[in-house]
Amino acid sequence: MKQTELTSKMIHGLKVRTTNEKEMNPETAQIGGLWGAFFEKIMPHVPEGTAGYGVYTNYESDAMGAFDVLAGTEVEIAELETVTLQSGKYLCFEAKGELPQAVIETWGEIWKYFTAVDCPDKRAFDTDFEYYLSESEAEIYIGIV
C-alpha cells in the first residue's frame, strides 16, 4: 500500500446503487451484472487497451450505507453516466492474480486495514475506485482524510 495525491478526472459508464449487504447475497447483488453490461454494451465502443474503472461514490454514510458504483472508462460515450474521481489523498492497494477474485480479496484486506483499532488512516467515503491495469492486475484507491 502507498499513499498518493491525485487530481480529478471524469469517468463515463454504467451505474447502480447498492450496499455491501446486498452484494453479499447472490439474489440481490448488482455489481457483477453491472460489469457484465459494461463489457457487453461499452467495451466494444472503446479503443483496445483502454483501462476500466470501478468507481464508488455518493456514500450514504460509511461502509454499511448505500453507495453508487460505476463501471466505466475515461472514454466519453454519449448517454452514459459520468462521475468525477475527486482530487485528494488516496491509499493505493495492489490486486494481482486472477480477476475478479484478486480484487475481492484485496477489498477484504482494505476492510481489515481500516477497521483495525490502530489504523493510522481514516476513510473519506467520498470517492474510491478500482483501476484495471491488465487482465491480472488492478489498483484500488481509497480516499482518505
Image (cartoon, helix red, strand yellow):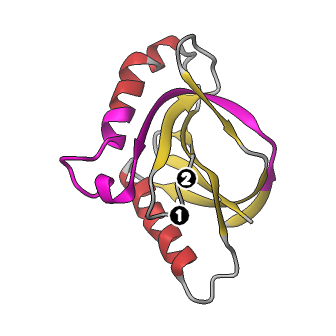
Q: Identify the residue shown where x is 57% and y is 46%.
A: 58
Residue 50, relative to residue 91: is it above or below? above
Please tell me how crowded label 2 is: few (under 14), some (14-19), or many (20+) other residues with Cα within 10 Å: many
**Which labelled disc corresponds to residue 62?**
1
Q: Is residue 56 visible?
A: yes
**On the image, numbered disc 2 is attached to which residue?**
59
Residue 108, relative to residue 10: is it above or below? below
Residue 20 shown left or right of residue 43 in the figure: left
How far across and down, in percent of the image, does residue 16 sit? 42, 36
Extreme residue toward the left, this view: 27
Residue 108 shown left or right of residue 133 in the figure: left
Image quarter of the N terminus: bottom right
Q: For this rendering, which residue is in front, 51 or 10?
A: 10
Instruction: Give the amino acid type for the residue marked by disc 2 in the picture.
Output: Tyr
- Over which residues does the magenta segment extend? 5-34
Instruction: Give the amino acid type for the residue marked by disc 1 in the picture.
Output: Asp
- Which quadrant of the figure has residue 40? top left
Residue 4, relative to residue 84: is it above or below? below
Q: Identify the residue shown where x is 39% and y is 53%.
A: 19
How far across and down, in percent of the image, does residue 109 sit? 48, 70
Q: Identify the residue shown where x is 65% and y is 53%.
A: 126
Image quarter of the C terminus: bottom right
Whether residue 24 is in magenta: the answer is: yes
Q: For this rendering, which residue is in front, 5 or 132?
A: 5
Residue contact at pointers 2 and 1, CB within 8 angstroms: yes
Q: Identify the residue shown where x is 54% and y is 48%.
A: 138
How far across and down, in percent of the image, does residue 68 sit? 49, 43
